[in-house]
Image (cartoon, rainbow, N blue to C red):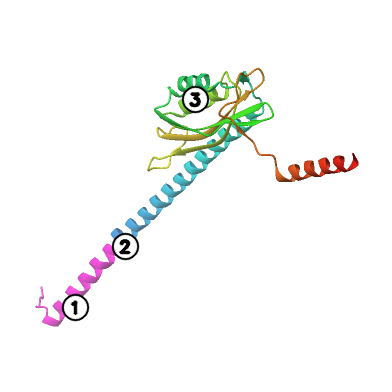
């Protein structure tokens, strides 16, 4: 059997070929396959996140539409002014089911004999069912009221279906209606301003009547 020693030049060429083969193997088997796997995984994660965000948005839209629909079917007693203590007691009972809540009051306003009292409500619920139950109870409050400006958000770092989220924050405005009929006082009420156009028109009519006399 014939054998011969490789020359230095041949050894260098063999080493270069071996390095190139190892480089091609790493590029094809390790780099390309790994990059494809990561890309496929990222695409799947992105599609899942988009679907979950769309589902959450749809659930929020359904909830807000339900509230708007129910807003037309007002129920409850129109209490005589000033009924703030009883309204606060009802709110405390309903919102006791929330994890935390806060209330912000606006000045009650009077138009004719109707009193409107706006209260901004913010509460945190740990389940979708609890959040919805509180909203329903607010709508069904024993004292006449309307719910508006509802906003539902989640503060979790990962996108999730609103129905399975454990971190729901709700803000809304609830308007209680009272009446000054048979009321002993109207103290603390701010009279709603009459639009300027109406005032001017009334003034013109008065002037005409005076002129006619």
> For mark 3, what is the residue?
134
Which residue does the image show at 49% across and 35% down from the upper left?
A: 171
x and y, in percent, of residue 208 in the image? 86, 43
Q: Is residue 100 visible?
A: yes
Q: Earlier in the sequence, mark 1 or mark 3?
A: 1
- For the residue carrying disc 1, how many other residues have a C-alpha within 10 Å: few (<14), some (14-19), or many (20+)? few
Which residue does the image show at 76% across and 45% down from the upper left?
A: 200
Query: Which one is closest to the eye, mark 1 or mark 2?
Result: 2
Residue found farthest to the right: 212
x and y, in percent, of residue 137 in the image? 53, 22
Any mark on residue 13, and which?
1
With 173 as the anchor, is 210 left or right in this view?
Answer: right
Q: Earlier in the sequence, mark 3 or mark 2?
A: 2
Quarter location, residue 194: top right
State the separation of the CA atoms marked 1 and 3: 79 Å
SS assignment for the magenta stretch, majority: helix
Any mark on residue 28, and which?
2
């Amino acid at each position: 059997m014939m054998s011969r020693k490789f020359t230095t030049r041949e050894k260098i060429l063999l080493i270069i070929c071996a390095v190139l083969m190892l480089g091609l193997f790493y590029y094809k088997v390790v780099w390309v396959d790994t990059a494809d796997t990561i890309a496929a995984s990222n695409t799947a994660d992105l599609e899942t996140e988009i679907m979950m965000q769309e589902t959450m948005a749809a659930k929020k839209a359904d909830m807000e539409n339900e509230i708007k629909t129910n807003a037309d079917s007002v129920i409850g007693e129109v209490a005589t002014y000033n009924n703030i203590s009883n309204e606060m007691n009802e709110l405390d009972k309903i919102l006791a089911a929330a994890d935390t809540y806060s209330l912000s009051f606006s000045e009650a306003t009077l138009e004719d004999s109707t009193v409107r009292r706006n209260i901004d409500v913010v509460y945190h619920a740990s389940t979708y069912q609890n959040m919805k139950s509180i909203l329903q109870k607010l709508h069904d409050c024993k004292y006449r009221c309307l719910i508006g400006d509802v906003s539902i958000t989640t503060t979790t770092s990962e996108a999730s279906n609103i129905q399975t989220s454990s971190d729901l924050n709700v803000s809304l405005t609830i308007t209680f209606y009272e009446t000054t009929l048979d009321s002993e006082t109207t103290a603390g009420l701010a009279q709603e301003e009459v639009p300027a156009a109406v005032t001017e028109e009334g003034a013109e009519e008065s002037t005409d009547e005076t002129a006619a006399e």
